Amino acid sequence: MLLSLDNRKVYFDLAGPPNAPVVCFTHSLNADGGMWVEQMVPLLGAGYRVLRLDMRGHGGSAPVDGDYTMDQLAGDVKGALDVLGIKKVHYIGLSIGGMIGQGFALAHPGYLASLCLCDTQPSTPPGSAGTWEERKATVRSRGLTALADGTMDRWFTPEFKRVNPQRWTEVRDTISGTTPAGSAGCMSAIQNFDYLDRLSTIKAPTLVICGDQDEGTPPDRNKLIASKIPGGRYEGIANARHLPNVERPEQFNRIMMSWLAANR
């Protein structure tokens, strides 16, 4: 489904009973709301309403030219919630989705019932500026297909490709289908943000989850986030890289459902 936000199209998927508690998902760079499909059955079965939003230039959402900021992307989430008439959510975001979640919690705390940040960073990864410039140049000149295989290696262990080749292919195709403008714009947001010193002001109940083999957004950076947010909790998922919700859904869903039940 599509909604209009600042005269551009934003794709969303909303499922579940109208008056139920809302779980709002935001996805990784070069992914879309489809990366949360493994979470849908347990959430709908437990009576939640589930909202999945596609970022600018990702999935079915229109791109915006130029560089984006993390605060702008957090504003997109608020704008979508306002258009849909949703006043409070259990927010779950992974990678840049978790970065957006921090910005959303800082700027719009009244919308949060709880916050779950997955495989993410509290600020621009140290020493990463050059890498992001190279990736932006690649996607602008050659498209996302040029980055797809390297991205999949960072996202999943080799075992996942052997055990789930169809799902592996679906995720890779989603990467390749991301617009260069949306990808590069979001990369710019990752290049230039820092929420670390403000995390102590977040009051929403917060859980941080990370795959123990995630090298891009490593466990120590996720543990740092949990340590800075008052009452923040950390949970690791064994034998998983950057997308533990896809690679180890049973473990992820068990943690997620327990967390949501405690804050319902």
Image (tube, grey):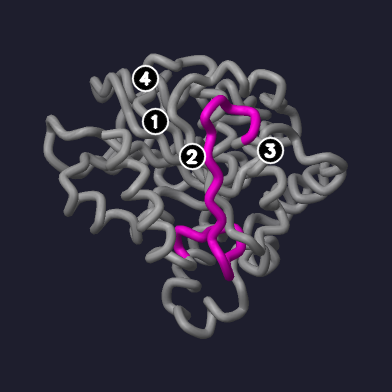
Query: Dot 4 surroundings within 10 Å: few (below 14), some, or many (20 or more)?
Result: some
The amino acid on which the numbered mark 1 sits, given as a three-letter code, is: Ser
Tell which tag, 4 or 3, sits nearer the viewer.
3
Q: Is residue 169 above or below residue 101?
A: below
Q: Which residue is mark 1?
A: 114
For the residue pair 67 and 233, the one nearer the viewer reads as 233
Q: Residue at x 52, y 40 (%)?
A: 233
**In x, y percent, where is residue 192?**
74, 28
Q: Which mark is residue 224?
A: 3
Q: Is residue 208 above or below residue 172?
A: above
Horizontal side of residue 241 vs 26, given as left or right: right
Question: Is disc 1 in contact with disc 2, using a CB cutoff of under 8 Å?
Answer: yes
Query: Dot 3 lies on which element?
Result: helix
Q: Position of residue 140 (x, y in %)?
A: 71, 47
Query: Which residues, given as a range, are shown in magenta?
Result: 227-246
Q: CA distance from mark 2 to mark 3?
A: 12 Å
Residues at discs 2 and 4 in contact (Cβ within 8 Å): no
**Badge number at residue 207:** 2
* Residue 111: image tag: 4
